[in-house]
Amino acid sequence: QVQIAESGGGLVQPGGSLRLSCAASGSSFSILNMGWYRQALGKQRELVAGITSGGSTNYADSVKGRFTISRDNDKNTMYLQMNSLKSEDTAVYYCNVELRRYGVRNYYWGQGTQVTVSS
């Protein structure tokens, strides 16, 4: 059994910062690629940032220079540091993890964490 748990969302004022965490737990797996997605009310889910097993990163244009994705392989955890937050960053943020378990690759989603940017 694999579980994905997110944390760190909340309410923040414009210009503020938040850090999201995503931890994978269970047994007999290795983590490949990881990513953060978000879905605003009435919009489609979109990729915010991704990080490969080798540490290469990519970002949506809308968050470049403001958000930083990272991972701690020893802790099976991924982070998203969000700075200079804007109202348009308001969304539910989801963690997506690609795992290899017993030779099979699968994608797992977290339950989502709400980020609200408002004064």
Image (spheres, helix red, strand yellow):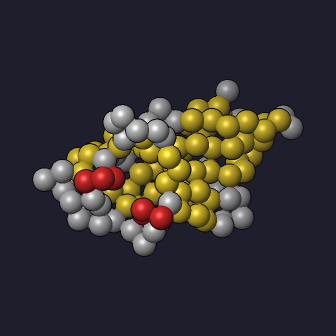
Q: Position of residue 10 (x, y in %)?
A: 28, 45
Which residue does the image show at 63% across and 44% down from the upper left? Answer: 97
Q: How many marks can you see? A: 0
In the figure, 68 relative to 44: above or below? below
Report the residue that reaches farthest toward the right: 103
Report the residue that reaches farthest toward the bottom: 65
Quadrant of residue 15 in the image?
A: bottom left
In the figure, 5 relative to 79: above or below? above
Q: Position of residue 29 (x, y in %)?
A: 74, 40
Q: Position of residue 11 (x, y in %)?
A: 23, 47
In this rendering, would 20 be left or right of 25? left
Q: Position of residue 5 (x, y in %)?
A: 50, 38
Residue 117 in view, yes or no: yes
In this rendering, would 103 be left or right of 15? right
Report the residue that reaches farthest toward the left: 119
Residue 74 in view, yes or no: no
Which residue does the image show at 47% across and 64% down from the upper left? Answer: 61
Q: Quadrant of the N terminus?
A: top right
Quadrant of residue 18 in the image?
A: bottom left
Which residue does the image show at 18% across and 56% down from the upper left? Answer: 13
In this rendering, would 36 be left or right of 114? right
Towards the viewer: 86 or 57: 86
In the figure, 82 relative to 25: above or below? below
Which residue does the image show at 48% across and 40% down from the upper left? Answer: 45
Towards the viewer: 64 or 111: 64
